[in-house]
Image (spheres, rainbow, N blue to C red):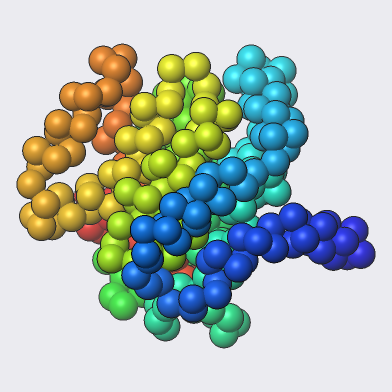
Amino acid sequence: GRFYQEACLYRTSEISDMFSLTLDQGEATYLSHENFTVRRERIQSAYSPDGLANLKKRTEEYIAGQRELTALEFYLAFEQASVLMLLHTFPRRGERNRHANGLQQTYGDHIRLMMLGFDMFDRSDIGWLMKRRWRNPVDLEEADLEDSVKRYHDLKLSRSERIAIWIASALHDYGKIFRRGYGLDAEDAAPLCDKLVEALSPDGMVELIHYGIRNHDLIEHTVTGDIPACFIKEAIEGLPEDKRERALPMLALIQQIGAASLGEGRLTRAKLN
């Protein structure tokens, strides 16, 4: 406990300037061009080169089959090497994003739980997924979740592809740190985390990772008919040809496992579909 407390104090001193740029204005708000530029540059440079280098070494060893690595282990190390921990200062609103113990879930809680969700899929832990269903009303049965897990394993993701999807999932809400509002966080995240993606991406995966970050919300609105499918289709066609078949599965995983990690669970049939 003392080690953890000292580590938090150390990290807080490192990113005190970041707090002044993200929390001083309270709610997400309009930014002048000057504030926009200063805040963007601060966030883009707020990471630990040594921490990212150490994590990159671990991922390379994992890809080479020299060690094991879980999605949650990856994310916790990533969190300590960047300002992802700031997401723990942004509570998600509403009763649906409240834990059963009464605590309001933060974006940091959500992403940690999401990374655990990837590990649960890898373990085919249907029991965990059953507990993460939306309860009002429940519209999923055990067989539905078993089918979803089977589809996940049928993808036969390589270790490089797993790392790419973990990076996109870890950073999908990174734009929230910018505090701009207007539903632009996915667009904000892409340039803000560019250096992080370049530092950690397996070979040839940068475009796929950015695709997942930019489009993780658009795919939901495409399914509901609010956004034309051409937006998703054209973005896929802009990817390297050998990465295109992984684009939609990446978005599906971010949506489905993301839903499982909201509050006490918001998995629905719509998400599985």
Q: Nearer the viewer, residue 173 or 222?
A: 173
> How many marks do you count on the picture?
0
Q: Nearer the viewer, residue 256 or 191?
A: 191
Placement of 261 over or under 202, stated as above or below: below
Q: Quadrant of residue 267?
A: bottom left
**Which residue appears farthest toward the right when viewing the image?**
2
Horizontal relation, residue 15 to residue 248: left or right? right
Q: Measuring 40% from the left and 81% from the top, which residue is drawn there?
A: 94
Provide residue 164's location: percent of width, then percent of height.
47, 31
Q: Quadrant of residue 108?
A: bottom right
**Which residue appears farthest toward the front when viewing the image?**
34
Viewer can see residue 162: no
Placement of 170 over or under 260, stated as above or below: above
Provide residue 264's location: percent of width, then percent of height.
48, 71
Q: Measuring 53% from the left and 34% from the top, which residue is drawn there?
A: 195
Quadrant where the image shows the N terminus: bottom right
Provide residue 257's location: percent of width, then percent of height.
42, 51
Placement of 247 over or under 83, stated as above or below: above
Q: Measuring 50% from the left and 17% from the top, which residue is drawn there?
A: 203
Horizontal relation, residue 189 to residue 44: left or right? left
Q: Nearer the viewer, residue 95 or 88?
A: 88
Viewer can see residue 137: yes
Q: Measuring 59% from the left and 43% from the top, which residue is drawn there?
A: 45
Horizontal relation, residue 120 to residue 9: left or right? left
Provide residue 209's location: percent of width, then percent of height.
41, 33
